[in-house]
Image (cartoon, grey):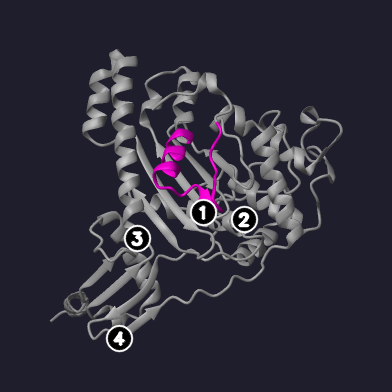
Amino acid sequence: MRPLNKIIILVLGVILFEFILWSNLVKQEGIHIFYYREGTEIKDTMQLTILNRELRKLVPKKELATNLKIVTTLSQKQSEDFFQISDEYKQNLFDRLKRDYPDYRSFIDSLYQLGRLSNISIIVLNNKTGEIENCSFNHGSEKVFFDRNQEFRATDLYGYIMTFDKGKNLNDTFKVNPKAPAIFQIPGWITVSRSFTWIPGGNIMSHPYDYYPLSDWRSLEKKLDIDLDFSHYRPGRFSGIQTSLFDLIKTIATIQNNGESTQAIFIRNVKNERNGIVYSYQNIPGKRILSKQIVQNMKGLFKNYMTRGPGVGQYLKNGIVEDAFVFDCKKSEFTSWVVYVNDMYTFGLIENNVLRTIQNDYSIRRKERFKLSSILKNILYEMNLNRVKGENLQLIETFQEETIEL
């Protein structure tokens, strides 16, 4: 037999052996049943995808080969309420768009039948316990929460945390655009606080963190226990630091918890078929990772942003009540996300609305985007999650003339 043939046979033999070994490992996977915290078995395939992913981080491989019962932090009631609200919203949106855009009726019908009219996803973190109480999405995949593709405003959030960590305060000033070409120079100085809300346009805007070295960003990533993406990093405005919505809500919850670290967990405990405990979450008090001064400065930034910044007039039309604030992003013409936080909960909400493409009129697309605040407000009311210390926190519609009823 020729040496080449021997090599081919040997390679095929190794591949066959590995396939048989892999098949046996797959067969050894036990039956894993996940339960809502109320005790009902979870059937939602998208939620199961996330939970299986988390389970493999917590349980050894040998235990995965056994039958397991997993009690999660997810709430069945919150999930059901969310799907009911999102379905009602899509139906109302469908009826209104057919009425307002008769020329696109067949296109709208097709999208509605395919379930792509408007896709809404939500993640709810309990700031006090660190438990994820809801993680629901009616289309797409779990990547909507975990992909590190949220760039705009995420860079700002972490950049300002780093700025305050270096000893800067809200009223400290810095020179606008110190390294920009002379043609783009704006003379004068600006406060750190004002730079978060003032957007005169494009690359002529400057922020205090624009030229921090990559090593500083990596140190902050480790300090906050998050996962940032630096693949598009370059010094200067729009530095390209990216993160996931999941890590973003953890960070904002940490700020709301006065600088104490916030864990975001999905699984409470895991038991085997003999009722033995394989894993049990221990609620360890968070350690301080942000100083009180940093927290005070960050909350001041958010308050200024919500009361005086462009987020009020252009994006969500929301005001604030007491300790509640909203952090928003327009990722593209098709996708918007918003983070809302109060004393008890941090919410991350994403909407994908392909119908923004049916009109070239920017004002129409902008009004469609305003819907996100109404969706979130309805979810808060229906799920009764906006009650904190007996007070009813709510999102205030500050531009009533542009409010679109659902």
Q: Does the magenta stretch include residue 160?
A: no
Q: Which numbered disc, 4 or 1, marks the residue that appears first in the sequence?
A: 4
Q: Dot 1, how many residues are within 10 Å of its Cα: few (below 14), some (14-19), or many (20+)?
A: many
Check disc 4 and report the residue beneath it.
276
Q: Which picture quadrant has residue 192? A: top right
Q: Dot 2, how many residues are within 10 Å of its Cα: few (below 14), some (14-19), or many (20+)?
A: many
Q: Look at 30% across and 86% down and name the residue there.
A: 276
Check disc 3 and report the residue beneath it.
50
Q: How far apart are marks 3 and 2 (CA)?
A: 26 Å
**Tag 2: amino acid:** Gln
Q: How far apart are marks 3 and 4 (CA)?
A: 24 Å
3 vs 4, front mark: 4
**Tag 3: amino acid:** Ile
Farthest residue, direction left: 1
Farthest residue, direction front: 390
What segment carries the magenta color?
Answer: 373-396
Numbered badge on residue 256:
2
Check disc 1 and report the residue beneath it.
345
| Badge 2 element | helix
Q: Look at 61% across and 63% down and name the residue there.
A: 224
State whether residue 287 is above or below residue 163.
below
Q: Does the magenta stretch include residue 395?
A: yes
